[in-house]
Image: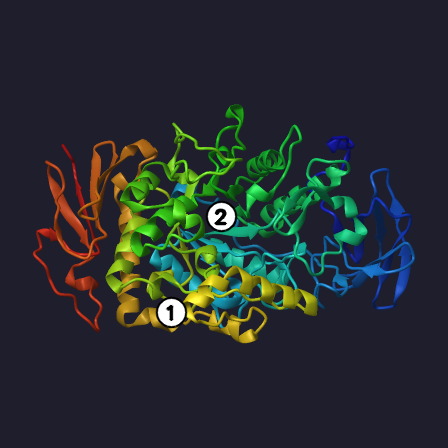
Amino acid sequence: MTEAPRGRFPAHDSPPGATYLGDGRTAFSVWAPLHTQIDLSLLDPTPRSVPMQRDPFGYWRVTLDAVPPGTRYFYQIDGHEQRPDPASRCQPEGVHGPSAVVDPAYTWHDAAWQGIPLRDYVVYELHVGTFTPEGTFDAIIPHLAHLKELGISAIELMPVAHFPGERNWGYDGVYFYAPHTAYGGVDGLKRLVDACHQHGMAVILDVVYNHFGPEGNYLWSLARPFFTDRYHTPWGDAINYDGPESGPVRHFIIANALSWFREYHIDALRLDATHEIYDYSPIHILDEMADEARKLAQQTGRPAYLIAEGYAPRLVTPRAKGGHDLDAHWADHFHHALHVVFTGERLGYMAAFAGLEHLALAYRQAHVFTSDTHTETDPPLAPMPNARPDQFVVCFQNHDQVGNRPVGDRKGALLTFEQLKLAAGALLLAPFIPLLFMGEEYAEPAPFQFFTDHSDPDLVRGVREGRKQEFAAFVAAHGVELPDPQDVATFVRSKLNHELRSGGRHKVLRDLYRELLRLRRELPALHAEALTDLETVVDAAAGTLCLHRRNGPHHVWIALNFAATPVALAPPAGSWELLLDSAAARWDDPATPATRCDPDLLAAHSVKMWVGNGS
């Protein structure tokens, strides 16, 4: 591939767009390599047009006085159409309206914050728009004390980059540098991050570097080489990371990643669908991003973690062994194996998972590498020999595994109360970084459904028809009506009711999550630093799976009964003390107290944990 030397592009600490320099002075930069004239069209206070100057690499620039924060502007292309700034920091009138200059100044209160190690992360994924009635960054802040008390150490925000309309999952973002104004914009996000750090909690931001959304993406007209038809993604042409003119594309993306760390004090980025990022250049975009993030972390003294969505071990394998050396990645096989054990559902990619043996594999190596759980591009692989538990993020619910079900039903709609308690133990006593999906800890009954707010009628029609085709078999089999993504009621149905966590079975479940997280923090045996510090014992006929976890002289024995009947099961020889029994009276549903079984038995759908020294 041919491209200009990367070192001659702007430094990664000089992102494109409008940079406010203070005293009313603003610098503008936009990459538009195929055009012969770009003018800056200022809309207020007095409309005027200012020619921009082109450099040898296709960037157009101008720096002006008397352009204060709030000034709205377009770029005019070749004397004709006007377009918003693809690197806009604020879109006050939506994806098709003018961009606005933003003052980045903010008085931070987190000078003492130095981050926390990944091994201490307990992640709480949330969608800003549905987490509270207000649906804003600021509205999350009053809930942070509750999350901290629960045992959460990091919140993960689904994508906030400006998307069409006011409601969306966030994966249709088209202005990667602009936190959505409906959520509270630049300052709102900074206030939330600042508050999290004051509570001792990290912030992970979900970012999408594999595609742009279908509405409001004006890079197509300003910088067509930003995309390539050499690779195809589910969303169309791929982002051009390795072809001609890819240098400015890489700069746009990496500068964006670093801006979240630098300007917003974000602690970690979750990189969406990395398997749809195509780059066959000598230095993969993920490698370059990781290098730049680590440089920034060294400069600031704060972590700048990169966590990938993707199951390929190469994501976290050291560079010297052919990997990208990212900090961690989502290990969805754990979810799939656990879901199949609980529900028996084996639709789609779940068909490759079956039985407790697969779940035991997931506990031992995070992934389930069999002939059925790989693709041509990711062949079966052996477990990573030196893998650390904190390189894997696992869950039992997340936005995908809930929201991509036909009606967005949560696990609470599929499992009994006893099974939900068992699931909590199965997740939180695993060695990996656990992720909870908002409301999971108290069995939030509201669904999390797929919702959009597009303005293009053809796009709205296409989304509706696409959902109908995807779930046609489900609709035919169950006679249900799919929720309309464009209907505001679909969005409203997905909002949480936090009052539930204070009473009844919801409070009991939340208290169990809190107790499990306390034990996770305090027991040395649950702090093991290698996957080899865990052994599994499976009895498929009885429906039980036992975990023996150890850290030096410290041991725990965890027994999980997935069967509907009690079983006789105890730890191996040694000195053991029972610390947890999910079937104990304190964890009963107040409305329907459980029938007690022999205390020497492992109750149906329950988890027990003993601490001791083993033998």
Indicate whether 323 appears above or below 73: above
Secondary structure at badge 1 equals loop
One can see residue 407 in this view: no
The amino acid type, in three-letter code, at marker 1 is Pro
Residue at (51%, 43%) from the top-left corner? 308
The amino acid type, in three-letter code, at marker 2 is Ala
Do tag 1 and tag 2 residues touch (Cβ < 8 Å)? no
Residue at (85%, 50%) from the top-left corner? 62
Q: How is the image coloured?
A: rainbow
Indicate whether 1 appears above or below 560: above
Residue 26 x/y as whole percent: 79, 54
Q: Which mark is residue 290?
A: none
Residue at (64%, 36%) from the top-left corner? 279
Res 98 → quadrant: bottom right
> In the drawing, does residue 154 fall left or right of residue 377?
left
Residue 107 x/y as whole percent: 60, 56
One can see residue 237 in this view: yes
- Return the residue nearer the eye: 58 or 106: 58
Indicate whether 60 appears above or below 452: above
Q: Residues within 10 Å of mark 1 (few under 14, many from 20)?
A: some
Residue 34 x/y as whole percent: 85, 45
> In the drawing, does residue 377 fall left or right of residue 72?
left
Q: Which mark is residue 445?
A: 1
> In the drawing, does residue 555 fall left or right of residue 97?
left
The residue that mark 2 highlights is: 112
Residue at mark 1 to residue at mark 2: CA–CA distance: 39 Å
Q: Residues within 10 Å of mark 2 (few under 14, many from 20)?
A: few
> In the drawing, does residue 191 fall left or right of residue 338?
right
